[in-house]
Image (cartoon, grey):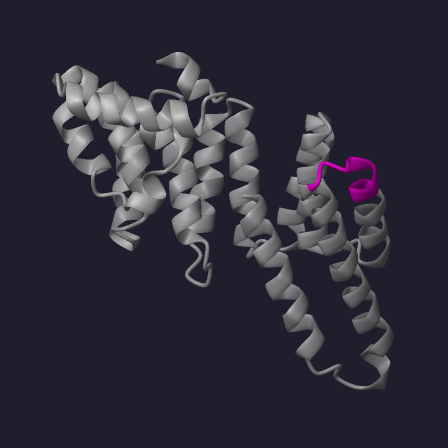
Amino acid sequence: MKNRLFLVLTTLFLSACVSDSGGPNSVSSDRSEEAAYINVQLGVNYMQKENYAMAEQKLQKALSYSPKSSLTNWTYGVLQEKLGYDKKAETYFKKAIRLDKKDAEARNVYGAFLCRQDRVDEALESFDAAIANPLYNGTLEATLNAGDCLLQKQRYSDAKKYLNEALAINGEAAKANYLLAKVYYHEGRYSQSSIIRKRISVAASDNPGVLWLCVMTERQLGDRNSEAICTKNLLRRYPTSPEADSI
């Protein structure tokens, strides 16, 4: 999420920098928007470094420049959730959506927040609103977020619907294949889980989640050689991970 957040902000900032000012009367407004974008980017950078005090300072400054910016409001909501202020975070997410009902990224971010609050049906409404926006370039991510949310809540049949939609967008998406394989594992369909997991590229497979899934599916299938290889890779590359502890 944070990498996509930074990409969204960078794209918007560059668009603002190259746009036509529209005449002398809009110069002050343009400069305020530019200043807001710069401070939002700085705030996101500080969030990535877990320097939340500085992130708060920069994002409050962004809000002072552009209080009616959807982007600024939902980014501030992200920070408030990180700080543990869930009610405050939701206030800013909702405000962002009110300010710009077409801001699909705000809907996606709010959906992820609602899922973490165990408000799954509300989360799906928010994800669906993002997915339905034909101009949104994050449709794949929102679809994956919906599927992941449902997987975490053990709603496997519903999760498969979204994950298959994600694969229809990009059949090689590593996360979509991984999550779908995980769904099949939890359903006890180990052969299907193994087949889908093996679609993931070698590079994308080098993470603790995929290696754990390999260990567990191959163990269930009785393939001791494959299980041993995945176990060795997981313990060697990610010895302190929760996945390594769980095998």
Q: Is residue 53 above or below residue 216?
A: below
8 or 52: nearer the viewer: 52
Q: Mainly helix, strand or loop, the magenta region?
A: helix
* Residue 231 visible in image: yes
Front residue of 194/73: it is: 194
Determine if residue 189 is in view. Answer: no
Image quarter where the C terminus lies is top left
The N terminus sits in image quarter: top right
Position of 103 with respect to 210 (left or right) is right
Q: Position of residue 243 (x, y in %)?
A: 41, 20
Q: In which quarter of the view is residue 194 placed? A: top left
Quadrant hosting residue 7:
bottom right
Residue range corresponding to the magenta coloring = 49-56
Q: Position of residue 51 (x, y in %)?
A: 77, 38
Q: Which residue, as the protein is rendered here, is positioned at the far bottom?
A: 23
Point out residue 120 in the picture as x, y percentages from the top left corner: 46, 27
Height in image: 207 above or below 12? above
